[in-house]
Amino acid sequence: MTEHIIDASIVEADNSKREADLRRDYETLGERLDRRGISIDAVKAKVAKFSVAVPSWGVGTGGTRFAKFPGKGEPRDIFDKIEDCAVIAQLTQATKTISLHIPWDKADPNRLKQAASRFNLGFDAMNSNTFSDAKGQMQSYKFGSLSAYDKATRDQAIEHNLECIEIGKTIGSKALTIWIGDGSNFPGQVNFADQFANYLDSAKAIYAALPDDWHVYTEHKMYEPAFYSTVVQDWGTNYIIAKELGDKALCLVDLGHHAPNVNIEMIVSRLAQFGKLGGFHFNDSKYGDDDLDAGSVDPYRLFLVFNELVDIEARDADFHPAHMLDQSHNVTDPIESLMLSASDVQRSYAQALLVDRATLKAAQTDNDALTATQQLRQAFRTDVEPILALARLEAGGAIDPLAAYRASNYRAKVADIRPTVEGGSGGIV
């Protein structure tokens, strides 16, 4: 039997105050959608199956480049993180898996599996870390990891990724995500071709160790922490890597890893068209890799990404990209932000399901720009909250996850158990 962190009676009490209004709103929305030839129950069924992974590091307070301001009840270890993730899953019913980061979350794999199974949670992609130095490691990644000039450093980085695969095999993960901070800060500091060749050789060694039913997701990032050049800096380079490695290698798209105004939804389409779209790290940004809550700055862009995903899904039944939140919460309770972000990702999916694909295709074929764009706007402007809320209710979650969470007083309770973390440290998570 699945355990619950928050007493079910608290969720039930909050739901009882909202259920009657929700069902009326759902019925009204259903009538409106029916006039558009859309079955609200069919949309709800798809939304109910949609899940986005929670990153273990996301339940802790993040930070800026200059400082970190810890919050109350910070998780002390991966087992506290799993409990926080269980709260998100219980209330939203939209986050069935956790993505671990090694070495931050390193623990006995069997204990990890047992801890997650208490809450009927699984594990998503493993994340390696060669962008910072771990205590006790022999070689430093200050001047690179998988692409470093020093072979001993490259070998160490490869071995770390192989360790992540072994942990993942035990806990039931099926993928490895690789992101490196390698690059340069000064013109002439590195030879671009040599550095990329080193990266490819290292990546091929990791790829060779992948189990047959695994994928490796390579992630690009335009800049930071290297500001002059970055080894895997854009989706084109990422595509080259995936092609060089093989069929099990796919590209991961983080919504914050692009220059302002870049057409991310078109990148999604291009990668999918050639079979190299692996998944997403959902967040939002204003200037760069801001790691803001998904949908908090540009919800229309999030919807446009899902418009492409639904279009691809309609053409390819075997298309199953990985979805994960990747955010840094500096001024909010991380659990609250992750719950709302999970709902906003689901919201964009539901809205994309409302697009009249036949009318859209006809307008595109006829070069009718306004009719085409109006199909998207109509779907985006539709309030699909009743669909999301009823899907949560029917799955045993909360109609209003934020209200139920605050009514539970969970943060104050764990703050009494978990020691207060000293502030003043620098850097992000």
Image (cartoon, grey):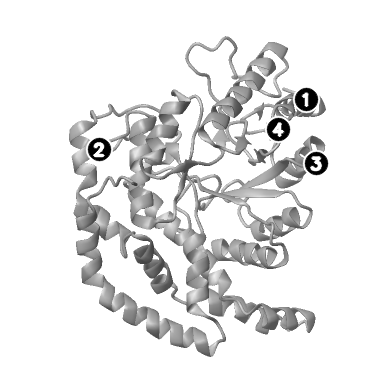
Of the image marks 4 and 1, the number of the one nearer the N terminus: 1
- Report helix, strand or loop for mark 4: loop
In this rendering, does residue 52 appear at all?
A: yes
Disc 2 to disc 4, how far (Cα)? 38 Å
Which of disc 3 and disc 2 is earlier in sequence? 2
Mark 1 closeness class: few <14, some 14–19, many ≥20 residues within 10 Å: some
Q: Mark 2: which secondary structure?
A: loop
Of the image marks 4 and 3, the number of the one nearer the N terminus:
4
Residue beneath disc 3: 243
Residue 321's place in the image compared with 191, above or below, is below
Q: Which residue in the structure is indicated by mark 1?
A: 201
In the picture of the structure, the residue carrying the numbered disc 4 is 231
Mark sitting earlier along the chain (1/3): 1
Marks 2/3: CA–CA distance: 45 Å
Callout 4 environment at 10 Å: few (<14), some (14 to 19), or many (20+)?
many
* Mark 2 or mark 4, earlier in chain: 2
Q: Residues within 10 Å of mark 3 (few under 14, many from 20)?
A: some
Label 3 is placed on what type of residue? Answer: Lys
Tell which tag, 2 or 4, sits nearer the viewer: 2
Q: Can you say whether 77 is above or below 138 in the image?
A: below
Residue kind at label 1, given as amino acid type: Asp
Instruction: Identify the residue under disc 2.
Output: 72
